[in-house]
Amino acid sequence: MTLKNRLGGHTNSYHTYSVEEALEGIAAAGYRYVELSAVRGWTEHVPLDADAKTLGKIQRMMNTLGLVSLSLSGHSDLTTKAGLEDGLLALDLCERMGIGIMNTAIGGHYSESEDEEAFMGNIHELADSAAARDIRLGIEIHGEITKSGEASIPVLERIGRPNVLINYDTANVEFYGGVRAVDDLRAALPKLVHAHLKDKRGEGRIWDFPAIGEGHVDFKEVLGILERGGYTGPLSVEIEFTGEPWPPLAEVNRAMKASRDALVALGLS
């Protein structure tokens, strides 16, 4: 199996570290692409209110390291007007940095008690603003309403915007949806725009997301499903360990390299 999908490292894997440390670690691990995190109150590697000097510094750093932007993680609580405003700021970042995919979630990073009607009252403005800039939105498998690929499809149908699609997460589907990726991923394929490759240890609501190959997610079958389904879009490695406190930087770097090595052995490059 040889897949031609672009494989990136997610800077959220370096949650408590600087953007410089994140980009250097991702490049040193062998990745050529990167998903940048711009999540207010969580991982703000790209500040939502970044000025031209700040964005220029980040872009020059990426150029020096040979990294290309794959996507932007712009999660905010889209059930609120404040979250919508943050989402619009994240879209501005995408436009300014030439990024064509913005990942988000209904209730942002923290929320699980999601108000679907409030979300529906905001998502169309975000989607239409994204479409005007030729940017696609990836609604992440996260929380209750989009806890799985199967659960997400009717949500997308209700939104009714062709540029609002799924950002699949191979571990969140277990954590939130109680189903394994190999049993659910096929349902998401028709609407898939992006995927987080994330491993998991422990059943159910155990927060333990180690390096790829060190948990129980069957990535050989996951990649096989993607290949057979004709998915050629971007893939991003995300490692969230056991949460805060984050491991030492050397361990994060090791985990990112081990993850890429494991995926390359399965046919990704």
Image: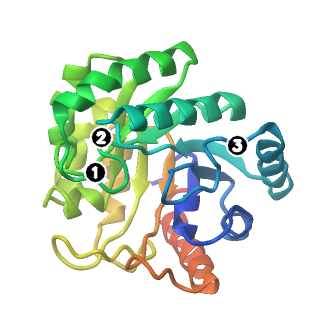
Distance of label 2 from label 1 (alpha carbons) = 8 Å
Q: Earlier in the sequence, mark 2 or mark 1?
A: 2
Q: Nearer the viewer, residue 186 or 93?
A: 93
Q: Which residue was labeled with disc 1?
A: 142
Foreground: disc 2 or disc 1: 2
Q: In the figure, is residue 236 to the left or right of 172?
A: right
Answer with mark 3 or mark 1, whichever residue precedes in sequence.
3
**Disc 2, disc 1: CB below 8 Å?**
yes
* Quadrant placement of the N terminus: bottom left
Instruction: Label 2, secondary structure: give it.
Output: loop
Residue kind at label 2, given as amino acid type? Ile
Where does residue 250 sit, x and y in percent of width and height?
64, 85
Circle 1: residue type: His
Q: Which residue is mark 2?
A: 106
Local crowd size for mark 1, using a 10 Å CA cut-off: few (<14), some (14–19), many (≥20): many
| Quadrant position of residue 138 | top left
Check disc 3 and report its element: helix, strand or loop.
Answer: loop
Mark 2 or mark 3, which has the lower sequence index?
A: 3
Residue at horizontal 54%, vertical 67%?
15
Going 40% across and 18% down the picture, which residue do you hit? 125
In the picture, the disc for residue 255 is: none
Horizontal and vertical percent position of residue 157: 21, 22
Using the rendered image of the protein, determine whether residue 269 is visible from the camera's viewpoint: no
Q: Nearer the viewer, residue 81 or 11?
A: 81
> Residue at (31%, 30%) from the top-left corner?
191
Tag 3: amino acid: Ala
Q: CA distance from mark 3 to mark 1?
A: 27 Å
